[in-house]
Image: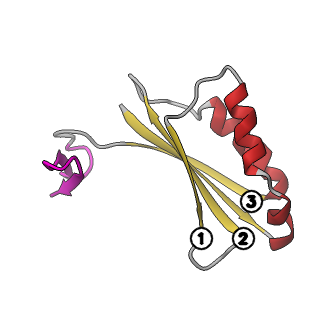
Amino acid sequence: MNWIEQIVLRSSCNTLKELDLNGFFALVNQDQISRPNRINVYRHGHLETDICILLFWETERSRTAASSVAQYLSRYLKDYGLVTHSWWIEVVGDDSSVGGLHQKTAGNGIRQHTE
């Protein structure tokens, strides 16, 4: 099952300058906890003080709570501003629980959503 966690930080320009995400990710890599397959960091298009961190996971089952990495990261970021966290499960196959939205994989491996 593919799922992602989204952590958004709304910060002031002064506190964001002090933020050391590379140091945080180095700590995560040393820890013996379960790690996401990929971590992407984005800056808001208009607000340079807002960042979004996406943790990409592939597990046998979806989570019913935040991962330990996301919990740790959220606690770390709270010193720098307002933090929100959510997680999202990929819609697969004939999952009609999402308004009839279905997913298919194109020949080039790009996933396309169709109604």
Residue 114 location (% of width, % of height): 16, 57
Name the mark on residue 49. Answer: 2
Foreground: 48 or 114?
48
Is the residue under label 2 in contact with that under label 1 (CB below 8 Å)? yes
- Of the two numbered discs 3 and 1 in the rendering, the one whose residue sits closer to the viewer: 1
State how far apart marks 3 and 1 are (Cα): 14 Å
Label 3 sits on a secondary structure element that is strand
Indicate whether 72 appears above or below 78: above
Look at the numbered discs 3 and 1 and tell me whether their residues touch, using CB distance below 8 Å. no
Q: Does the stretch in magenta take in 1?
A: no
- The magenta-colored residue range is 96-115
The residue under the point 65% across, 34% down is 69
Q: Which amino acid is tagged 1?
A: His
Residue labelled with disc 1: 44
Magenta: main secondary structure equals loop
Q: Quadrant of the N terminus?
A: top left
Upstream in sequence: badge 3 or badge 1 = 1
- Mark 1 to mark 2 CA distance (whole Å): 8 Å
Counting other residues with Cα less than 10 Å from the Cα at mark 1, is it few (<14), some (14-19), or many (20 or more)? few
Helix, strand or loop at mark 2: loop
Residue that carries the numbered disc 3 in the rendered image: 82
Residue 99, percent from left and from top: 23, 53
